[in-house]
Each structure stands twice: as C-alpha cells, then as structure tokens.
Image (spheres, rainbow, N blue to C red):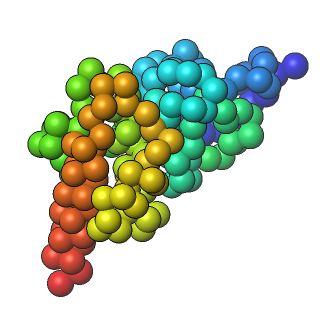
Amino acid sequence: MSFPLTLTVNGVKRNVVLDDPRVTLLDLLRERLDLTGTKKGCDRGQCGACTILVDGRRVNACLALAVSHDGAEIKTIEGVAEGERLHPVQAAFIEHDGFQCGFCTPGQIMSALGLIAEGQAGSDPERIREAMSGNLCRCSAYAGIVEAVLDAQKKLAEGSRRSAA
C-alpha cells in the first residue's frame, strides 16, 4: 500500500509517496528529501534537536508521522536564511555565542523562531528559558541562546515597526 502526500517544504511543493505509514517527518526530511539540518538526537521528543515549524508551530519532527501532515507547510533550518543573508535569529545566535558544538543549534533556532512568532518570548529571560526548555544543549550555551532570542526579537520588532511606518 502506498501513501501519497503533498507538503510545502521551505516554500517548495513536494509530492512524496510513502510505502510505510510509520515514517516520521524527521526521517522523511533527512532520508528522502536530503534536508539533514534537522538533527536526530534522542528520537523520543525529549531533546528538541529535531524541532521544525509545521504550519508556523513548533513540532518535534521525530514524534510527528509524515502521513498526518498531508498539505502542511513545513519550515526547516535550510529554509530560514534568504540566500546568503542570515535571518536575524541566526545572526543573533552567532553574535551572542548561542552555540558551541552546533548539534542542537538548528533545533534551537527553529524553536526560537516559533517562540517569537507565537508572541511568547516576552522580555523576561526566565520566560524564554522556560519556553525553550524542550530544547537541550549538552554544551550549556543557554545564556547565549537566551540573549540571542531577546536580541533577535528586539531587532525583528524594530524592523516591523520601520516597515509599518
């Protein structure tokens, strides 16, 4: 039995036929679509390395069955930058040393993007730490990650105010 589905991944419509309904979004992205920026950490939804945005919401791709997301809009780390120009969240992670080994960084950035888009970041570092608690960093770059989220959120808000004026 085959399972056809259509996904829009990083702005590109993708038609995929699965032969197994148990394929996760993570495995589909990494193994079938060659989008390896999304990392397989724990494969149990506990580390956040596989965080992507599905229809604008943060999702652990290792826990999401691909067949359940037919028609979804998916954004991975590969779709964040605009050409060579980094997204403000990516730039803030670099500026504030929000990464060390880099393994968790794609999931951290995707979670930060979702957090900011949801309007949940606020200006309280503790609130950001709590909202990003599903993303683990073995290197303990948490202080830099929180600073990056605060800085990126501020820059994005300033940019939207300028474009509205």
Q: Residue at x 16, y 76 (%)?
A: 162
Within the image, what quadrant is residue 142 found in?
top left
Identify the residue at image location x=27%, y=21%. 101
User: Residue 122, image x and y in percent?
Assistant: 35, 68
Q: Is residue 123 above or below residue 128?
A: below
Q: Quadrant of the N terminus?
A: top right
Residue toward you, 22 or 49 = 49
Q: Position of residue 48 (x, y in %)?
A: 49, 34
Which residue is at 50% across, 41% downward?
Answer: 134
From the viewer's perspective, is residue 57 above or below residue 21?
Answer: below
Quadrant showing the C terminus: bottom left
Q: Is residue 22 above or below residue 112?
A: above
Q: Nearer the viewer, residue 116 or 65?
A: 116
Residue extending furthest toward the right: 1
Image x and y of residue 21, in percent: 79, 25
- Side of 138 where 20 appears, left or right: right
Q: Tell me if I can see residue 75 in this picture.
A: no
Q: Residue at x 15, y 43 (%)?
A: 96
Q: Is residue 83 left or right of residue 74?
A: left
Where 126 sits versus 165, above or below?
A: above
The answer, for residue 105, to whether it is visible in the render is yes
x and y, in percent, of residue 106 in the image: 36, 33
